[in-house]
Image (tube, helix red, strand yellow):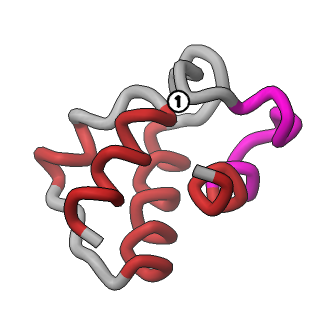
Amino acid sequence: MNNVIDILSEFTETAKKDILPQSRLIEDLNLTSLDVLDMAGAFEQAYDIEISDKDIKSLHTVQDIFDYVQEYA
């Protein structure tokens, strides 16, 4: 989970300590749709995975990202 938060922290002004599993990407972390795409690219690079556009649209919380990485990385 810490590595997921480390990557997310590059795209939000929210302090790492305030990024929680239930934090919503857009509503709580104030990410734009472009930020979400850039973030997905960072996860693809960090974990050597490919995240489809359909899957990106299903990632709404930090926990969603963690679960996705756990399943596909």
Give the class, few, some or many, for how many residues have Cα within 10 Å of label 1's Cα (few <14, many ≥20).
Answer: many
Q: Up-down: is 33 above or below 18?
A: below
Q: Up-down: is 49 above or below 34?
A: below
Q: Secondary structure at mark 1?
A: loop
The answer to if 10 sits in the magenta stretch is yes
Q: Residue at x 51, y 57 (%)?
A: 39
Q: Residue at x 41, y 54 (%)?
A: 37
Residue 26 image position (x, y, % from top left):
53, 24
The answer to if 12 sits in the magenta stretch is yes
Question: Can residue 15 be seen at all in this image of the molecule?
Answer: yes
Residue 42 image position (x, y, % from top left):
50, 70
Is 38 on the left or on the right of 31, as rendered?
left
Mark 1 highlights which residue? 25
Residue 7 image position (x, y, % from top left):
64, 61
Question: Can residue 26 be seen at all in this image of the molecule?
Answer: no
Q: Residue at x 33, y 45 (%)?
A: 67
Is 38 on the left or on the right of 8, as rendered?
left
Is 43 on the left or on the right of 21, as rendered?
left
Question: What residue occupies the far top of the structure in this picture?
Answer: 27
Quarter of the image for residue 59 reads top left
**Which quadrant would the C terminus be assigned to in this image?**
bottom left
Q: Residue at x 73, y 42 (%)?
A: 12
Residue 38 image position (x, y, % from top left):
49, 61
Q: Which residues are magenta?
A: 8-19
Type of amino acid under label 1:
Leu
Quarter of the image for residue 69 reads bottom left
